[in-house]
Amino acid sequence: MSQQAEADKRLTVTHWGTYRVTTDNGVLTAVEPVEWDRNPSKIGFSMPGAVQGNSRVRRPAVRLGYLQGKPANREGRGKEPFVEVSWEQALSLVAAELRRVKDAHGNQAIYGGSYGWSSAGRFHHAQSQLHRFLNQFGGYTASTNTYSIAAGERVLPHILGDLDDLQRQHTHWPVLAEHCELFVAIGGLPLRNAQVNGGGANDHALDHWLQTLRANGCRFINVSPVRNDLAAVGDADWLALRPGSDTALLLAVCQVLIAERLVNQDFIARCTVGFERFAAYVQGEDDGEAKTPEWAASITGLEAETIRQLARQMAQKKTMINMAWSVQRARQGEQAYWALVAVTALLGQIGTPGGGIGFGYASTNLAGAERRRFSGPRMPAGRNAVSARIPVARITDMLLHPGEHYEFDGQTLTYPDIRLVYWAGGNSFHHHQDLNRLIDGWRRPETVIVHEQYWTAQAKFADIVLPATTSLEREDIGSASNDGFMIAMRQHLPPQGEARDDYAIFSALAEKLDFAAQFTEGHSARGWLERIYHESRPRAAEDGIQLPDFEAFWAQGKLEYAAPDVPQILLKAFRDDPEAAPLSTPSGKIELFSAAVAAFGYREAPGHAYWHTDEQNAQQEQRQRWPLHMLSSQPRTRLHSQYDHESVSQQTKINGREPLWMHPQDAAARGIGERDIVKVFNDRGALLAGVHLTEDIRPGVVQISTGAWYDPLNAQENRSLDKHGNPNVLTTDIGSSRLGQGSTAQTCFVEIARFNEPLPEVTAWLPPTFVAFAEEQEFAASNLSGE
């Protein structure tokens, strides 16, 4: 066997990169990025300490109060110690509770919470495993859309098409490098976001392509409150607009294009519907207020002439306009994407090599990659017999308000009455907004069951915690759409403690619940790997990829697909012939006015891109009390909250707290200096953070990364100070609008004061207290007998 083949046997795939691992007697000693990765992520260097560290869940554990009171005891979540039990006890308890809830309340009373990101492997993907298990158990209440981009996911099908499909069709970077003259990055193009991918990640190429575009003469404009959002291009122009005002800016650009006759009328006539209705609104015919640059200047904080010149430059150049996902994570976030579609449609450059529209360049390591779209093997999840599903960002609403009605994307729906939450993969205490409100809701269901690798806040707030393996402790196949690689992920380490993979856990539960044969179909984990690999071969062939048989692939260790034969240009076929290649919208064209959305009767979404003055006024009132606008960005040192407890993330902390960026002008007014510890607060909660002063952020705005593990000063108190710096203690848990019901984390106002008290110790990464349960034998006997 060649030296390269031996090296490829040490490969593992993560969401942030592919690495070769070195082990010694069952201990992970080192990781190194693969040689083909042009800008490898440092996150991987946290893996040795994390996988083997003190924060691992090593044995099944049950909250003491739950053992004593079972479903009647809920208030102790997050406050009480745990009892470590045997796997037999834990599985019997879980199976009995699933059966009880199903029999007493129906499958709709089970919420199958999972948010992915637990593994880049195609088989040991916790979300797929959980959904397959619950589907075969009779179904469950599910969630729809994402925290990342729900507002966009809901509005775009009405006006342009499915967002997931659009992102996979984005114009390839080499095409832009050859043709693009102006790249307008609304929300920037942050390298930190492009470290990760929903599946595996291999070659981090964003920095390379940004440098290539710039060297070829492309000019970049960063439209963001934070200069660092486009740090990779040092001479990018910076338009430091106010957070949440992107829609107003784009409407004003549309007004200039219309008023100065810069609209591509041929494209509008062939490829869009509703221009007249939209133009009437922009010109003020509907409400008496033209959306001019002067109108937008007072909203955005930009000069009117700057806005006017921006519109003219867009019309004069081959212009790509991309909007980061973060922009739509705000109140009325849907309208920002609708306004982006409007601007690019009026410019008429959609479907051209050098211009058009983007929704995800740099948001992950996916959009624009010159790779084939083949996603790799898939684990069949089956069909959910329960039709109920909620917008994922409305979890707390569901838990607090069972039976209440809510409006969502033209429907009036009812929140189900959830009695049991089953979570495998993901961490709601990272993703969800207004954590204190979430805690209130989290204590409403009768039982919370979690599969976890680490003692996160979600695990500490659960009733039953089952220890799960990491990707290094099992076999899998690493692959992702637009990634271009398939990796044989061998098991490199024995499971830590008594950890089991999710498939083994669900197989054992299915055995206790009498559907093991249906769930496993007679396959071991290795058997499933072989099956899903072989089932993917016809799909690969459709995409021009000839996969070898499984044995050859596993021996080889790595496959790389050739680049596509024809470079990809987003919506080129539609532009060339809208009749032959229609969009998936009701009209088959770009809908500048949507009759379907207008028919919903939502004041905040009248059927076209819209600036909601009532929302603007409400936010201005909030600023009177909380004068600083807090943005919560994706971190550069971890994926979401993963590996916050290890070296790469720890090196960036300030006195153990998450860093917060602040303009010197705002700091001076509050007597705050560099690296001071501050209290950040509003009427939802308070946290501690360490200050970094910089002029690369707009005055009146502060920024802190998400992902610091929630760490209450006193878990026994409601609304306790978070001593570590989790911004979701402060963010709003209100839907973006009735149209999308997405996350609104970026619409958040706070005040900041220097923290002069003794600093409390950060304990976020410590396991909970464990105690012995004197009645353990009695408990085991009663549950094993089904009582």
Image (tube, rainbow, N blue to C red):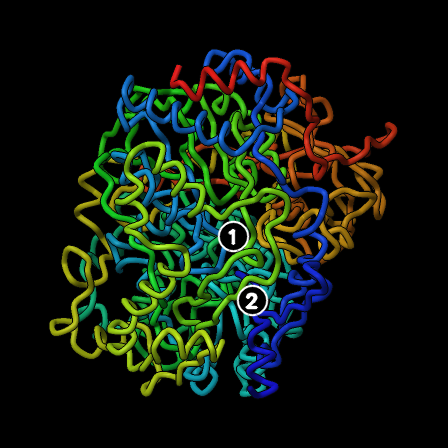
Q: Quadrant of residue 527?
A: bottom left
| Distance of label 1 from label 2 (alpha carbons) | 50 Å
Camera-nearest residue between 551 and 376: 551
Furthest residue in direction left, as rendered: 579
Camera-nearest residue between 238 and 82: 82
Amino acid type shown at disc 1: Ala
Camera-nearest residue between 194 and 772: 772
Q: Nearer the viewer, mark 1 or mark 2?
A: 2
Amino acid type shown at disc 2: Thr
Query: Is there any visible trace of residue 445 in the rendered image?
Result: no
Neighbours of disc 2 within 10 Å: few (<14), some (14-19), many (20+): many
Task: Please provide percent x and percent y for residue 282.
Answer: 32, 53
138 relative position to 373: left or right: left
Neighbours of disc 1 within 10 Å: few (<14), some (14-19), many (20+): many
x 70%, y 26%: residue? 769
Camera-nearest residue between 477 and 38: 477
Could you tell me which quadrant the C terminus lies in? top left
> Height in image: 90 above or below 320?
above
On the image, numbered disc 2 is attached to which residue? 12
x 56%, y 73%: residue? 204
Callout 2: SS: strand
290 relative position to 275: left or right: right
Callout 1: SS: helix
Query: Is there any visible trace of residue 292 in the rendered image?
Result: yes
x 34%, y 55%: residue? 523
Could you tell me which quadrant the N terminus lies in? bottom right
Task: Please provide percent x and percent y for residue 566.
Answer: 32, 86
Which circle's residue, 1 or 2, is located before the other in the chain? 2
688 relative position to 1: left or right: right
On the image, numbered disc 1 is attached to which residue? 297
Task: Please provide percent x and percent y for residue 110.
Answer: 34, 29
Q: Quadrant of residue 278?
A: bottom left
